[in-house]
Image (spheres, rainbow, N blue to C red):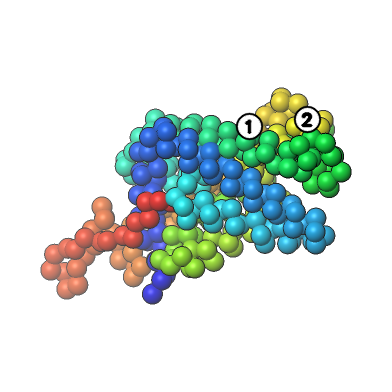
Amino acid sequence: MDYVKPGEVLNSMIEAGKTKAELSVMQLIIRGVLGGMILACATTLAFTATAQTGIPMTGALIFPVGFVMIILLGLELVTGSFAMIPLAVMERKTTSPQMLKNFLWVIAGHLIGCAVYAVLYGLTITKMGTDMSNPMIQTLISTSETKTTAYKSMGAEGMGLAFIKAILCNWMVTLGAVMAMTSKSTAGKIAAMWLPIFTFFAQGFEHTVVNMFVIPAGMMLGASVSFADWWIWNGVPVLLGNFIGGVLFTGVLFYLSQKGVNSGGATVVSGVMPAVGGKGAVKKTAVMEKSL
């Protein structure tokens, strides 16, 4: 059977967190760059589908292609790591400095990757800066303003709203990364990942990596958004909200729901479970997916 049981998924999450924390700075930056570019490309694909059909749900159905590519290729998406590396720290499989190293360099990679794609895509839809009639230009401008100055106009409530939408977003995004571990087959992984990613995008929640593309792209095309608007009213509150949504809603709560219990309900201590008949103990083997 393809299905991987929840207790094994938890072990895979912890092992994946450990593996991510041990990557070199160069690997983190490169994987972060590629992850940012792919997610940005999936965002413009979703916007294009919405524009062509006039049905926003169409874009949400298509957007998960980017997440699927990132996960299957073992690239880095910092928001997914928010649910896994903290668990590895809790289990003393890695350290807090290593966790922060991953977050810092992957975010740096995302910023580079999203900026590169924003420039290339901007040149494409403006025909090298000679034609501003493409409807996608206005889509990026209005989206950039909606994600920044619209919150600014609400004051503290706007910042709180962005923060809450970010928590809800990364609850779903991290579930997507975890759901990939519930199957051993490629098709099963894709189907499982698709569900929560579609859910977050369809409801307009706030994802920091998507915003690392959308907001700067809109700014490049003429949006009335400053660098301060980006980071004060979206960048910082959304990053913090994504972290809390991932580490708490998915990481800690799933950990507490599964820690110490195997699929049959028996208690597991330090990875060892009682053998049948009580004649000793056997090691519990987990399905590890170190690329996630």
Q: Is residue 257 above or below residue 28?
A: below
Measured as percent of width and height from the top left, residue 166 is found at 64, 44
Task: Determine whether, in the image, residue 202 is placed left or right of residue 91.
Answer: right
- Of residues 18 and 281, the one drawn nearer to the viewer in this rendering: 18
Q: Is residue 225 above or below residue 47?
A: above
Q: Which residue is pictured at 40% across the width and 66% down the height?
A: 184
Which mark is in front, 2 or 1? Answer: 2
Q: Which residue is pictured at 19% across the width and 68% down the height?
A: 275
Q: Is residue 233 above or below residue 6?
A: above
Measured as percent of width and height from the top left, residue 167 is found at 61, 45
Mark 2 and mark 1: span between their CA atoms? 15 Å
Q: Which residue is pictured at 36% across the width and 68% down the height?
A: 263
Measured as percent of width and height from the top left, residue 127 is found at 78, 41
Residue 117 picture quarter: top right
Q: Secondary structure at mark 1?
A: helix
The numbered mark, 2 or 1, whose residue comes first in the sequence reads 2
- What's the residue type where badge 1 is placed? Val
Looking at the image, can residue 157 be seen? Answer: no
Direction right: furthest residue: 133
Q: Secondary structure at mark 2?
A: loop
Query: Disc 1 designates what residue?
Result: 236
Task: Determine whether, in the image, residue 74 is placed left or right of residue 137.
Answer: left
Q: Is residue 180 above or below residue 22?
A: below
Where is the N terminus found, in terms of image quarters? bottom left
Neighbourhood count class around disc 1 (C-alpha, 10 Å): few under 14, some 14–19, many 20 upward: some
- Of residues 280 and 177, the one drawn nearer to the viewer in this rendering: 177
- What's the residue type where badge 2 is placed? Val
Task: Determine whether, in the image, residue 206 is placed left or right of residue 10.
Answer: right
| Residues under numbered marks 2 and 1 in contact, where contact means CB atoms less than 8 Å apart | no
Residue 235 picture quarter: top right
Query: Disc 2 designates what residue?
Result: 225
